[in-house]
């Protein structure tokens, strides 16, 4: 018996290319391909594929939520992305996602990741996962880091304050402290430092 795989990718050529690559492996059958996370979840509910591969570019938090829901159905789930950051790893790991792999991964390793997730293992880069869950070299407090994550998504001070149930003044203080701790010139520079360090 082979592994039944569903491919979810909103880019048509990328979706077709990924499906064609997977079909080359004799132990894998592509049982469907969809162009949205909603369709992926609906397909998983109806047909229960062994593994669902969700492509995303790292900004789509809905992909992680969908992966979590798919995993809850008993299907393996793998997030395929161009950039694995600590923030994404932390969210995906906490959500119960089966794995997170980069598009630059060689096909042989990708097939192996699918096999491992199908067997119930979780496939995350060990070093990055440990760093993500501990953030041991990040000088920011958990609250400052949360503010930074919101800021990285383009949220304004007003929006961050509302979402985190803080005053706007407190959010500004966290942002100022964040800039100082990172030795940055500005909030934007602090965000650059955090991204270069792969904290977010």
Image: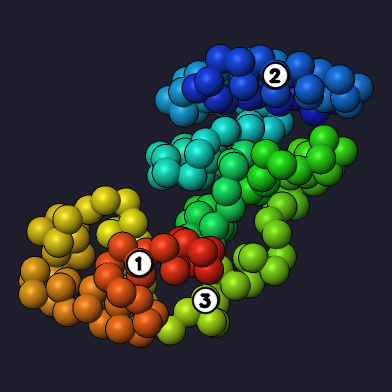
| Label 3 to label 1: alpha-carbon separation | 19 Å
| Residue at figure coordinates x 61%, y 15% from the top left | 13
Residue position marked by numbered label 2 in the rendering? 17
Separation of disc 3 and disc 2 at Cα? 36 Å
Instruction: Tell me the residue at 71%/42% (across/down).
Output: 104
- Relative to 112, is 90 on the left or the right? left
Residue 9 x, y percent position in the rendering? 55, 25
Q: Toward which corner of the image does residue 70 lie, by quadrant?
A: top right
Of the residues tagged 3 and 1, which is closer to the observer? 1
Tell me: residue 33, above or below residue 153.
Answer: above
Image x and y of residue 30, in percent: 73, 18
Judge whether residue 162 can be spotted in this image. Answer: no
Which residue corresponds to the image point at 58% horizontal and 52% vertical from the top-left?
84
Q: Earlier in the sequence, mark 1 or mark 2?
A: 2
Among the two numbered marks 3 and 1 on one chain, the one whose residue lies closer to the N terminus: 3
Up the image or down, 141 lies above or below 17; here it is below
> Which residue is the site of mark 3?
135
């Amino acid at each position: 018996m082979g592994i039944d795989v569903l491919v979810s990718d909103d880019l048509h050529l990328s979706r077709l290319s990924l499906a064609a690559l997977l079909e080359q492996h004799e132990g894998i059958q592509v049982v469907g391909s969809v162009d949205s996370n909603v369709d992926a979840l609906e397909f998983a509910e109806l047909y229960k594929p062994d593994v669902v591969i969700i492509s995303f570019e790292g900004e789509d938090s809905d992909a992680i939520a969908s992966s979590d829901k798919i995993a809850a159905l008993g299907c393996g789930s793998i997030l395929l992305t161009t950039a694995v950051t600590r923030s994404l790893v932390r969210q995906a790991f906490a959500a119960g996602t089966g794995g997170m792999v980069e598009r630059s991964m060689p096909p042989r390793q990708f097939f192996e990741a699918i096999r491992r997730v199908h067997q119930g293992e979780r496939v995350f880069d060990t070093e990055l996962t440990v760093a993500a869950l501990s953030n041991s070299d990040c000088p920011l407090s958990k609250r400052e880091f949360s503010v930074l994550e919101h800021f990285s998504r383009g949220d304004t001070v007003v929006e961050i304050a509302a979402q985190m149930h803080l005053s706007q003044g407190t959010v500004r203080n966290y942002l100022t402290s964040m800039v100082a701790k990172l030795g940055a010139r500005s909030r934007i520079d602090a965000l650059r430092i955090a991204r270069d360090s792969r904290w977010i």
